[in-house]
Image: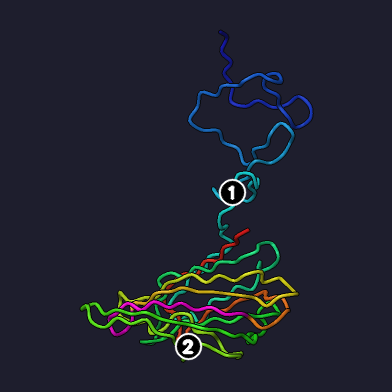
Amino acid sequence: MATLKTKTIQPSTGTNVNLGNAGTAILVNSDSIQTNVYKDSGGNTIFQSDGAGTLSNVNTALTGAGPKLILSQTATTGTANISFTANIDSTYDVYMFMFINIHPSTDGARLDFQGSTDGGSTYGVDLSSTAFTAYHHQNGSGGTLTYAASRDQGSGTTFQEICSGIGTDNDQNGAGILYLYSPASTTYMKNWCCRSNVYELGDYTQEYFMSGYFNTTSAINALRFQMHTGNIDDGTIKMYGIS
């Protein structure tokens, strides 16, 4: 068997270098192949990297049907709000917003959200909502499941509460998931639902189940999350698309 040793192989003409014939298996005895674009024999891109470890283009056959991370935003001390003003459109049937380790600047603050039909220029879409909660103290006392009449809206344009009573102790936080369904529809109302849990300022766990709909046939194309008072001092909100 002959051995060819070289640092670079370049085509004599064009841009392609052909290794072997059709149907021939090429064995590469190496622990890595370094390339920014990998294509099949038909010239279709399998994946593409920006050269710095980030995939900028992945063939849809490789990505599966699970949630696709679109954008992640992390608050720092004094963040007034976290807003998503792009990429909420007809690309996905469902948009999932995962909020993690939300820590407020004001003790007992709640996390609210609202939608926009003008790309985030204004917020205050009419919505209707309903809610119930459950809680249990660290010391084992208490424990109820209650319809939360004070946390829903019959028809209102204010920001909707989705996570309440978060404490400001160093280890206290709130977390949850909000789903927004078919926001680009111009026929139907925009349903949403949210489930969250809080390490409450009174040292108990409180779970929130909230849902509702934006009472508009206009497309919802932006969402904003903010504390009802004070700022977000820490926490991350990630937006995913689900086909």
**Residue 24, quarter of the rendered image:** top right
Image quadrant for the N terminus? Answer: top right
Q: Position of residue 28 (x, y in %)?
A: 55, 24
Amino acid bearing label 1: Gly
**Residue 174, quarter of the rendered image:** bottom left
Name which residue lies at 45% across and 75% down. Answer: 76
Q: Is residue 93 left or right of residue 194?
A: right
Image quadrant for the C terminus? Answer: bottom right
Name which residue lies at 62% across and 70% down. Answer: 181
Answer whether residue 211 is magenta in the image: yes
Q: Which residue is mark 2?
A: 151
Amino acid bearing label 2: Arg
Name which residue lies at 75% across and 32% down. Answer: 15
Residue lying at the far right of the rendered structure: 13
Majority secondary structure in the magenta region = strand
Alpha-carbon span between mark 1 and mark 2: 37 Å
Going from the N terminus, do you reach mark 1 or mark 2 first?
A: 1
Name which residue lies at 64% across and 73% down. Answer: 85
Q: Which residue is mark 1?
A: 64
**Residue 23, quarter of the rendered image:** top right
Q: How many marks?
A: 2
Instruction: Give the foreground label among 1 and 2.
Output: 2
Residues shaded magenta: 200-213
Q: Is residue 215 left or right of residue 176?
A: right
Depth order, front residue of 2/60: 60
Local SS, label 1: loop
Q: Position of residue 159 (x, y in %)?
A: 55, 86
